[in-house]
Amino acid sequence: MKTLKIEDLSKNFGTTEVLKKINLDIDEGNFLVLLGPSGCGKSTLLNIIAGLETINEGNVYIDDYNVSKVEPKDRNIAMVFQSYALYPSMNVKENMIFGLKQAKASKEKIEEQLKKVSSFLKVDELLKRKPSQLSGGQRQRVAIGRALVREPRIFLFDEPLSNLDAKLRVEMRREIKKLHQTLKTTVVYVTHDQTEAMSLGTKIAIMNHGVIQQNDTPEIIYNKPSNTFVADFIGSPSMNLIQGKIIKKSDQFLFVGNDSKATHIPIKNYHFDKNMELNNKEIYFGIRPEHIYYKKSNDDDFEIKLKAELSEYIGNEQIITFNYSEQEILAKFPSTAKIEINKEINLYFDLSQISLFDKNSKERI
Amino acid sequence: MQTNISASTYRQLEQKSKLTNMFLRWFLYFVLILFASYFIFPLYVMIVTSLKTMEEIRQGTLLTWPSTLNFDSWAVAWGGRGYGAGDTFLKPYFWNSIKMVVPAVFFSTFIGAMTGYVLTKWRFKGDQWVFLFLLFGCFIPFQAILLPMARTLGVLGISNSILGLVVVHTVYGIPFTTLFFRNYYVSIPTELVKAARIDGAGFFKIFFKILLPISAPIIVVTVIWQFTQIWNDFLFGSTFSFGEAAPIQVALNNMVLSSTSVKEYNVDMASAIIAGIPTLIVYVLAGKYFIRGLTSGAVKG
């Protein structure tokens, strides 16, 4: 039984297709993050799960029960919003118990739930305050409390940390993680922030233009991106995608950049997803900046001489831009490394960490 | 290149800018006082004239302070001279106006709040057309609808009655009140409504429990606007009512214009002031919120 299952879901606003044939499911207790750039349809998908938007095609199941036409309040879900959406005229207590009151829960039940949740979230001191008298972090806590009180099957979070400042965001992120570890409730969480997605999710679904690009664990998404969009979207700075082609020399596959004089890079131990003719295939050679070293780290590392062109210092690290076959390659080194600009230096590519993509389909090969 | 300026030059410049500032300040006050007196002048004339006797007025001393303060004209304006037919005075019409303005303001404000709520928080297909037509209602000259409205009131059987005027003012207030509330509710995050829907609140509950309690600033704006419009209206009042059902502005006109005997300027002035007092009171009580409500589109929760 899947806690949440989405089947062939399509949604359009007028002639704009926002979601195209989405299929997605979540097992009990999982933390699914919907990640993507703005306008990719992730918030619309969340609103559809909540029942706040109608569906054009497809179905939504919660615990195998088709809820596509069920009212939001009857779906056994709770939602936390980006703007917190606390009712301004009510104090914290009234905000938190509003849902239970609507559901006509007994007085004892309401009191019990309120006590449990407010002490759990450490907001018991704030119960008499109005939302306008709370700080951003406290508001966020109350908004989560309002969701917790309802004891839902699924928690929906719509960019809940976007309104907080950087420091508080990291704190609240950890709190949400702890919350999930303690309660083990199923969560669907929308964000455009990859760090949030990576640190919180047990599964990440990356969306673009209304289509799910890849749905997997954070590790697989980071290590084996299924197309160039995912490769480019995850990681900072993002993965180097070098244009070039594969050539075959004495049973060994080699990668060479657009300029055939550039250093040939051997492709060893790469697990090809698909069987296809590889010789002379036009591809993107993907390697993350953090998998390029300035000292040999593994026996398999491939040594290559490249010219350093630009250095960006960011405190604990530095990002150096190199030139390979007239294409920019970024590498991330600790800031203690001394790199001279406009000079060729020896670099080591970690060939166990590369990804190759078909140039035309942009899919992983 | 930088040029060095000596300390004494700085002192001179400082002195100069001080003088300029002082001059500009005095000039500003002068202009402000000039305009203030220009606007307050008619009110002054009205008040002093209303407190003078007719003999004193006939002397032609328009601006002088009355020799003795005489409130007789106020009593006459409000309660009449006490003899039967032909004596027009404001008291009954004042109450007519109150009976008209209170329900008309209430209903137009309430309906405007409702439509504003629907147009922003329960969007439906073609809602922007509905809003456009409502906006259009703000620009219709009232003279253009006098005849159709008279006919409508006749068919409904409420012509020449206070109820009829309440209906007319409510209907013609809705475009304005809707505009006010729509613009206010647009700035309130729709997430509030979504949260309430998930919490299980319905259409009316969300309106009364969530939105209305935070609408005070715009309610004040709308009430002042509607009160002023309806209280000061002469066109609808004079067209759709006569005799005993007339509102105060019509009665004021009848008093001042159709007086058969000598013109009593002091009574006229007193009547005009009485007819203007309620709007003045509303402004004084709620004016602070009026400015605040008009300028602040967004009220943070």
Image (cartoon, rainbow, N blue to C red):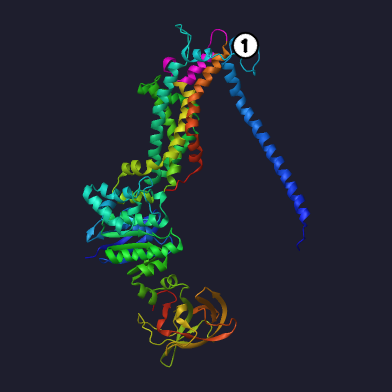
Q: Measuring from the top left, give residue B101's x and y in whole percent.
A: 42, 26
Amino acid tagged 1: Glu
| Rendered position, B109 above or below B17 | above
Q: Measuring from the top left, give residue A81's x and y in whole percent.
A: 37, 55
- Tell me if residue A101 is in the magenta stretch: no
Residue at 43 percent across and 22 percent down: it is B97
Residue situated in front as seen by the camera: A139 or A235: A139
Q: Measuring from the top left, give residue A26's x and y in whole percent.
A: 28, 66
Q: Quadrant of the C terminus of chain A?
A: bottom left
- Tell me if residue B259 is in the magenta stretch: yes
Whether residue A239 appears in this view of the structure is: yes
Q: Measuring from the top left, give residue A304's x and y in whole percent.
A: 50, 87
Would you identify the image quadrant in which residue B64 lies? top right
Please name the residue that numbered disc 1 is placed on: B56
| Rendered position, A170 above or below B289 | below
Which residue lies most toward the bottom here? A250
Q: How many marks?
A: 1
Q: Is residue A232 left or right of residue A51?
A: right
Range covered by the magenta-colored residues: B241-262
What chain is tagged by disc 1?
Answer: B
Residue situated in front as seen by the camera: A337 or B294: A337
Whether residue A45 appears in this view of the structure is: no
- Is disc 1 placed on a helix, strand or loop? helix
| Rendered position, B98 above or below A252 | above
Q: Dot 1, crowdedness within 10 Å: few (<14), some or many (≥20)?
A: some
Residue at 38 percent across and 43 percent down: it is B211
Q: Quadrant of the N terminus of chain A?
A: bottom left
